[in-house]
Image (spheres, rainbow, N blue to C red):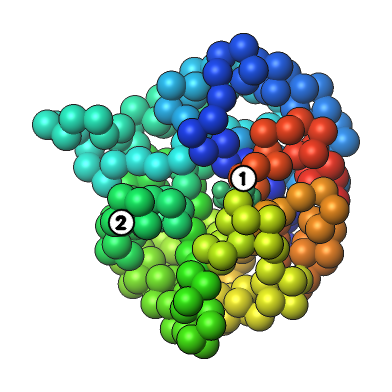
Amino acid sequence: MRTRLVVGNWKMNGGLASNAALLDRLAAGANSLARGTTLAVCVPFPYLAQARERLQGTPIAWGAQDASERAAGAFTGDVSCGMIAEFGCRYVIVGHSERRQVHGETDALVAAKARAVLDAGMTPIVCVGETLAEREAKLTDTVVGRQVDEAIEALGNEVSRVVVAYEPVWAIGTGRTATPEQAQAVHELLRSRLVGAGAAQVALLYGGSVKAANAAALFAMADVDGGLVGGASLDANEFLAIGGA
Ligand code: PEP
C-alpha cells in the first residue's frame, strides 16, 4: 500500500535561530499528522546538522535539496551524497525546476544524481514538470514523460526506490496551483510509465503552491500520494496542517 509523504523544501531560506524555532514546533506538532503520513524537511546544506539535532528521535525526517553526482574530488562548491548521508538524511531532492532552469541541469544529470543518492542509501525525490509555455503548447505529457523516462532508463529496477514529484513550473511559488484534476492527469501518466517499469508503488508527490487550504483536495486524487511544499513549509502551523490533511 502506498502511504502519504509530505516534504518541505526550504529552498535558500533560514537562519540558525529561526530554524530552531521552526524545527522544534514541527517536532512538537508531529502528533497532529494524518494517520500514515510521513513529514520531512529538505534544508540548505549548512543546516543539515541542526535538522538532525532537532529532529532525531521524532517522526519527522530530513534531507537535502541537491547533491553532486560525483563521489569526491576537485569540484569546488559541490557536496557529495556520502557527505549528506553522514547527517542521517533520508531524502535528497534532485532536478528541482530551479536547478534545471537556473543551473541548466539536464535530464541525464538529474538521473545521475538520483543514482548517486540511491548508492548512498538515501531516497531521491526526482522532480519533473512543464513550463507554462510547454503546457500551453500541449506538451505537458511529452515533457514530463521524457523526464521520467530518463530516470527509469538510467535507474533500471532501482527506480522503484525513488519518489517522483510532479511540479508544474508555472505553479511553483506563484500562488497558482494546478487543479486536483490537472495534477491527477499528469500523475496518472507518471504512474503508467512507472507501472510499465515494474515500479507501481513509487510515491508521486504534487508540488506547486500547496497550502493547508488546497492540500486535502489534491491528496484526495487517486495517484497523488502527498506533496512537495515550498513556501508553506516555512510556517510550522501551515506545514503541519498540510501534513494533517
Ligand atoms: C517547491 O519549491 O518545490 C515548491 C513547490 O514551492 P511552492 O510550494 O512555494 O510553490
Residue at 77% across, 22% down: 25
* Mark 1 vs 2, N-terminal side: 2
Which label number is shown at residue 67? none
Q: Is residue 136 left or right of residue 111?
A: right
Residue 55 lies in what quarter of the image?
Answer: top right
Which of 20 and 135 lies nearest the eye of the viewer? 135
Q: Amino acid at mark 2?
A: Glu
* Residue 98 in sight from this viewpoint: yes
Q: Amino acid at mark 1?
A: Gly
Location of residue 148 with respect to 214 vertically, above or below: below
Label 1 sits on a secondary structure element that is loop
Q: Are marks 1 and 2 in contact (CB under 8 Å)?
A: no
Which element type, helix, strand or loop, lies under badge 2? loop
- According to the picture, the residue beneath numbered tag 2 turns out to be 105
Residue drawn at x 83%, y 64% as measured from the top left: 217
Quadrant containing the N terminus is bottom right
Label 1 to label 2, Cα distance in Å? 20 Å
In this view, the residue in front, 194 or 204, is 204
Which residue lies at the image location 31% right of the left edge and 50% below the top edge?
103
Examine the image and state in which quarter residue 7 appears. Answer: top right
Label 1 CB-ligand 1 distance < 8 A: yes
Q: Nearer the viewer, residue 178 or 188?
A: 178
Identity of the residue drawn at 60% across and 51% down: 173
Q: Position of residue 235 (x, y in %)?
A: 73, 33
Q: Please rate how many residues cluster around mark 2, counting C-alpha atoms within 10 Å: few if below 14, some from 14 to 19, many from 20.
A: some
Which residue is under mark 1?
A: 230
Q: Residue 75's x, y, as percent?
A: 16, 34
